[in-house]
Image (spheres, rainbow, N blue to C red):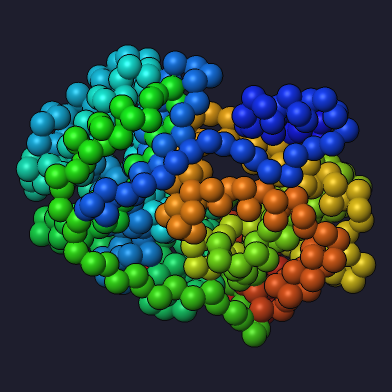
Amino acid sequence: MRKIAALLVLACTPAVGTLMVAQSAPSRSSTLRIPFEGYALPNGLRVVLAPNHASPTVAVTVWYHVGSKNEAAGKTGFAHLFEHVMFTGSGHVPYGVHDRLTEGVGGSNNGTTSRDRTTYYETVPSNYLETALWLESDRMGFLLDTLDVQKLNAQRDIVKNERRQRMDNQPYGLVGEIISNTLYPAGHPYSWDVIGSMADLTAASETDVKDFFRLYYAPGNAIVSIAGDFQPQQAKALVARYFGAFPRGAAIVRPAAPPVTRDRETRLVYEDRVQVPRLVIVWPTVGRRSDDRFALGVLDAITAGPRTTRLTKALVYDRQLATTVGTSQDSDENAGEWRLTITPRPGVPLTDLESAADGILDTLKAEGPSAEEIQRATAGLELDFVNDLESNLGRSMRLADGLGYENDAGSFQTEYQRMMAVTQADVKRVANKYLTKGRVVLSVVPIGKVEMAAKPSESTPYRRTEQ
């Protein structure tokens, strides 16, 4: 696996670097070298250009520093709702034209919303770069020219149906929302789900939504990242032509979203329309500003995944207590969480499963991981990291994330180095620091079967306040 990853690292380096490393096969570069340049327009729009002529395609990512974190209690779901609204047409681009000028020429387009940012992106043949930039600029500058209450209501209904499909009517679909509501204190910007609540979506007025757009969808809060087959001077001229005349936008006050710590365990049981119970344990950790996230990511890779990882090997294969085991370290901009999800085999109590998992983690905390475990984990993480940079879209997004979060489009280099430098001692330290008794333990059980929860007498029933 490490040999494969090493070859992919070479694919990301300039030709001279490739030749130098290829002459000394056993050595591996500790740096990913992707040529790019960054600059800003007078209106505050930041731009990243990463030419790569390997294929005649180009990716354009427009990154707005706004997510569900920027909403307020009682007005949740606006950021994600606007992701949908942005595809309804704008001042000079009627509905359907965006797809026709991207998908219709063999390309693609989409958007994503997180707690911290919203992105819109296109991958198109390189001769359609100007078209992609025009489409994005029209959304930024002229979306409100055609947005009316009928369009808003149509997208509102689509988002509501998305919530029903992905959360309300999906087995275990409310786990994320329950965890967020419990892990973070009331009013914390990470305490509500990105998709928002039904009540807030219903109450959102046309004025509310337009005010949200005016504040956050402005050049001073945006990044344009271009990667692929293009000439930088031409791209600079096009960006200036299509984005340069827009006003900077108002100053934005970022909400405080500090990492949380918990001094005790919270145990919940939620009755869901499921046939099989599930155990979810979540510990609060750190956001992107802390280097501990790299060791926590390696801890994640050591504990679950392939059959040689600690929890998967012990619970799924050796002791056959579980059908699936999953872990994840998720670092948002300001805070993070480490999650363990286990589905038991038929007849295995969640209490026994929790005890077994805790025992395995306690051993890891006491002894630390082996050198071989570190090697396997970092090899897999390295492969994923480099694969993400192989495509033009992956590059454009990674560069935009770096500039948006760290004010450094080249931060991927530091991230790669710190990830690969994680040691056995680092993993042992973060396991002991973060995997403490200050956690949320959620048992999802079939309706009417609260006795199937882990330690049911100590678990509080979770009651939804919204139906």
User: Is residue 243 at least partly visible in the picture?
Assistant: yes
Instruction: Report the front residue among 109 and 310.
Output: 109
Residue in view at x 25 percent, y 31 percent: 238
**Residue 314 in the image, given as x and y percentages of width and height:** 88, 52
Instruction: Report the front residue among 323 and 445.
Output: 323
Determine which quarter of the picture holds residue 423. bottom right
Instruction: Report the front residue among 65 and 332.
Output: 65
**Residue 208 in the image, given as x and y percentages of width and height:** 15, 61
**Residue 218 in the image, given as x and y percentages of width and height:** 22, 53
User: Split into 4 quadrants, where in the image is the C terminus?
Assistant: bottom left
Decide if residue 94 is on the left or right side of residue 107: left
Decide if residue 163 is on the left or right side of residue 130: right
Instruction: Report the front residue among 83 and 240.
Output: 240
Picture mark count: 0
Decide if residue 176 is on the left or right side of residue 32: left
Residue in view at x 85 percent, y 66 percent: 425
Determine which quarter of the picture holds residue 92. top left
User: Is residue 455 at least partly visible in the picture?
Assistant: no
Residue in view at x 11 percent, y 46 percent: 144
Residue in view at x 19 percent, y 58 percent: 249
**Residue 191 in the image, given as x and y percentages of width and height:** 44, 69
**As drawn, 280 above or below 241:** below
